[in-house]
């Protein structure tokens, strides 16, 4: 139905706000192309064939992946020993 398409379309437009904020260097066309690939795979014509609800799902999945990556990086940095701002070098030797 038309009303369902409109609400999914509106949801798609709104769902673009967060990835644009998180990935400011990514152009809108790149974002759409990438989310189409997430939704449909790297197949010919995917951009033309992808439905709005597929793109919404792909955007949600992508944001979850980004959040998981950030959480993992935060956990890793929290587990690292505090060296008072000094980073360890692979070539350094302890005396």
Image (tube, grey):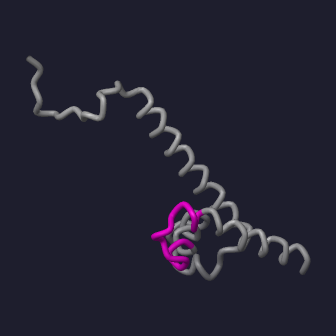
Specify the farthest residue to the front: 84
Quadrant assignment for the C terminus: top left
Residue 72 position, x and y percent, is 48, 38
Q: Please tell me in which quadrant of the rendered image residue 58 appears.
A: bottom right
Magenta extent: 19-31
Residue 62 position, x and y percent, is 58, 57
In this rendered view, identify the residue nearer to me: 73 or 86: 86
Q: Does residue 58 sit above or below 70 in this rendering?
A: below
Residue 66 position, x and y percent, is 53, 51
Question: Is 82 left or right of 40, judged from the image as shown?
Answer: left
Residue 69 position, x and y percent, is 49, 45
Question: Is 13 left or right of 48, judged from the image as shown?
Answer: right
| Residue 5 magenta-highlighted | no
Question: Is 95 left or right of 73, judged from the image as shown?
Answer: left
Point 45% across, 40% down: residue: 73
Q: Please tell me in which quadrant of the rendered image residue 47 appears.
A: bottom right
Point 53% across, 74% down: residue: 33
């Amino acid at each position: 139905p038309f009303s369902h398409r409109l609400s999914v379309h509106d949801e798609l437009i709104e769902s673009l706000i967060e990835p644009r904020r998180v990935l400011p260097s990514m152009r809108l066309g790149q974002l759409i192309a990438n989310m189409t690939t997430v939704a449909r795979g790297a197949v010919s014509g995917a951009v033309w064939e992808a439905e709005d609800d597929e793109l919404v799902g792909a955007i949600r999945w992508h944001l979850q992946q980004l959040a998981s990556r950030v959480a993992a990086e935060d956990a890793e940095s929290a587990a690292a020993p505090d060296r008072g701002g000094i980073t360890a070098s692979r070539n350094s030797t302890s005396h």
